Amino acid sequence: MSKKISINVVIADRPYPMLIDPEEEEMVRKAAKQINEDIRNFKNKYEAKDKQDFLAMCSLIYAVKNAQSEKNIQLKDQSVMDEINEILKKIENTDRL
C-alpha cells in the first residue's frame, strides 16, 4: 500500500488540499484543470452567472457523462454475456454430436 501524499488543487480560484495516493496525482490534477477549463468556457458563454452556477453546471455535465458511461458499460457487458451464451450453446450442440 503506497503512502499518501499531500497536494493542493485550485478549482474556481479556491484551493483544496488533498491527501491522495501518488499514482492518483496526475489524474486529480488533470480533473481539476478540466473543471477550471469548463468553468472558463461557461464564463465566456454565460457572463452574468456566478461561480456557484458554473460549478453546478459542471457537476451536472459530469454526472450525465458518468451515467452515460455506466449505461454503455452495462450494454457492453450484456453484449459480451450474449456472445458467451451463444458460444456455450454451440459447444453444447457440438458435444451432443
Image (cartoon, rainbow, N blue to C red):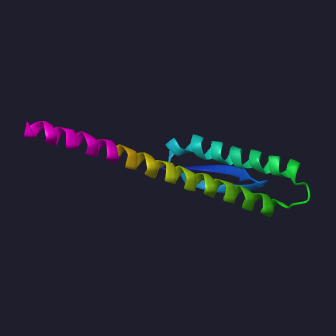
Camera-side residue of 50 and 80: 80
Residue 85 position in % (x across, y down): 27, 46
Camera-side residue of 87 and 3: 87
11 left or right of 7? Answer: right
Asked whether residue 94 appears in the rendered view, the answer is yes
Queried whether the magenta region covers residue 94, the answer comes back as yes
**Stretch of the chain drawn in magenta:** 81-97
89 left or right of 35? Answer: left
Count of numbered tags: 0
Residue 72 position in % (x across, y down): 50, 48
Camera-side residue of 73 and 15: 73
Q: Which residue does the image show at 15% across and 42% down from the upper left?
A: 92
Q: On the image, which quarter does residue 90 sit in?
A: top left
Q: Which residue does the image show at 50% across and 42% down from the upper left?
A: 23
Q: On the image, which quarter does residue 29 sit in?
A: top right
Residue reaching furthest to the front: 97
Q: Quadrant of the C terminus?
A: top left
Mainly helix, strand or loop, the magenta region?
Answer: helix
Residue 58 position in % (x across, y down): 71, 55
Residue 43 position in % (x across, y down): 85, 51
